[in-house]
Image (cartoon, rainbow, N blue to C red):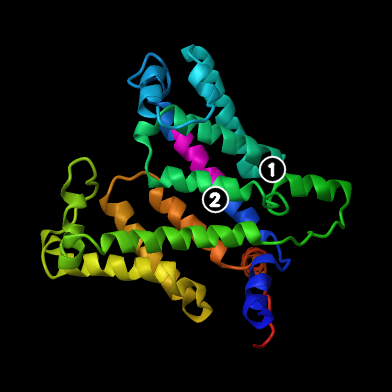
Amino acid sequence: MKKVLGPLDRFVFEFTSPATMSLFRIFLGSIITLNLLLMAGDFQIWFTEQGWVPTEMVRKWGSSRWYYNPFMNVLDPTLMKFIYALLLLVAILYTIGLFSRVMGVLLLLGVFALQARNPIILNGGDTLTRASLFWMAFAPVGAMYSVDRLRQLKKDPGAPVQQASPWPQRLMCYQWALMYFTTAWAKGFGNLWREGTAAWYPPNLSEFTRFWLPGFLEQQPFVGIWTYGTLIIEVALGTLVFYRPWRKWVLIGGILLHAGIEYRLNIPLFAALCISGYVNFYDGEEVQAWIDRIKAKRQGRVIHEPAG
């Protein structure tokens, strides 16, 4: 049993550099901050009693669910705007890594409450954001690349970075893999996906279409290539991404997939969120080595890696 579970136990729990989790904090916080800024222009429409979704409608929408949402009791639009501004401030502080753990918990609660205040406009990216914030609440997200780290060094210039168990990072890897695998699994039961025509439909919906594409690329055999290629990449992202020799190529496939979606479909920040999570498939030491190489190049130095 130890031979079987030992490698898995080390993969999930063996202490490592917190560089990956700290870097993902910056990505996740930046995306949430940008999302809040993008919604600010329509804030009154979506999140106040003066808009299209008053609290009574939300109560009827979620009548079968039981949970407490403090935002459901905020009926004053001015007070709701103030709370929204505070949430935006929390997102910014989380991104820069000031009081990271506290800001992470507050951001999780705030994002959950805000999204529950208007579930009508949510999509899969919002669900993925909530799940990520939950796992990140248990991670040492301020250990590196943060104001918290700078404050620590100011007090103790020689303070080493404390290694940590990467289990929140590993669970986010499984979250991403499960997302892709179940998506491909569900698509496999659809006739349009099996026929190789499904990729034609979303770009031709006026609600989603974004940038122009030459007409011949929206005809066969290219539609079949986009359709089956999507399925192949999603299955690989749910399985083969854990095989290290193939990891880089699978993730490049995922980047190309989401780059195409971002170009052709108007789904704000979804591609950015999915791609940012790919960093979790790399160990902290790997990410730290990347950052060190970037710093060295900017300073005109060369880092020689050991052979092998």
Pair 1/2: label in front: 1
Identify which residue, 173 or 247, lies in the foreground: 173
Quadrant of the drawing holding the N terminus: bottom right
Residue 209 placed where, x, y %? Answer: 22, 46
Residue 31 drawn in magenta: yes
Q: Which residue is drawn at 44% across and 61% down?
A: 178
**Which quadrant of the view contains residue 275?**
bottom left
SS class of the residue under badge 2?
helix
Q: Nearer the viewer, residue 98 or 236?
A: 236
Query: Distance from label 1 to label 2 (Cα)?
Result: 14 Å
Residue identified by numbered label 2: 27
Give the x, y percent position of residue 247.
48, 74
Question: Type of residue at label 2?
Answer: Phe
Q: Which amino acid does label 1 sit on?
A: Ser
Q: Which residues are the magenta region?
A: 27-37
Report the front residue among 59 and 10. 59
Q: What residue is disc 1 on?
A: 100
